[in-house]
Amino acid sequence: MDKKLPVVIGVAIFITILVYLALENSLLYPTLFSTPISSEEAVSIIAQKLNLTKDNMKQFSTAYVYIKGDGSVFESDVKSNSIGKYIESAEPTKTTGNYFAWEVRYDNSRYFIDSTTGEIISSSNSFVS
């Protein structure tokens, strides 16, 4: 029994390290359930909400951002989900949670669309800086 204990402990440590590395690596790649929606999908969500035609679709602009619950907006990259520098302020999010989101601008309005669920998490009728 005394000889088996170090082997069992060694195997347990090795498996723990493998699981840790697998979990760390999994955060780097989007999964089926957390793949971000495209900017076109975000625009179509807003266009549908506003009952707009295809002629109005050219007037939209989008940016992938990170928005905090208090409305602070930061640059972000859709491929890496990195958080960059502070850009501007917006209305607080509906749940006061933090999100990676698509910022969709149309006329003088901004809409923030959750990048995984497509839910509108914040909106405003004027630009706040």
Image (tube, rainbow, N blue to C red):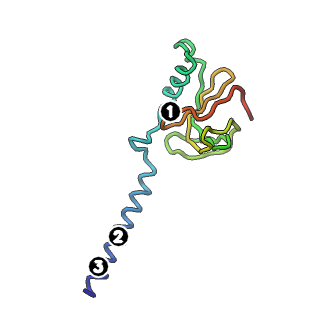
Q: Is residue 88 above or below residue 56?
A: below
On the image, the x and y values in percent for residue 72 come to: 68, 42
In depth, the one of 20 and 118 nearer the eye is 118
Quadrant where the C terminus is found in the figure: top right
Image-based side of 94 in relation to 81, left or right: right
Query: Label for residue 14?
Result: 2
In depth, the one of 90 and 65 nearer the eye is 90
Residue annotated with mark 3:
7
For the residues labelled 2 and 3, the Cα–Cα distance comes to: 10 Å
Q: Amino acid at mark 1?
A: Gly
Q: Secondary structure at mark 1?
A: loop
For the residues labelled 2 and 1, the Cα–Cα distance comes to: 40 Å
On the image, the x and y values in percent for residue 112 come to: 59, 33
Which residue is found at the position 60% from the left and 18% from the top? 59
Nearest to viewer (mark 3 / mark 1): 1
Which residue is found at the position 50% from the left and 26% from the top? 40
Q: Amino acid at mark 3?
A: Val
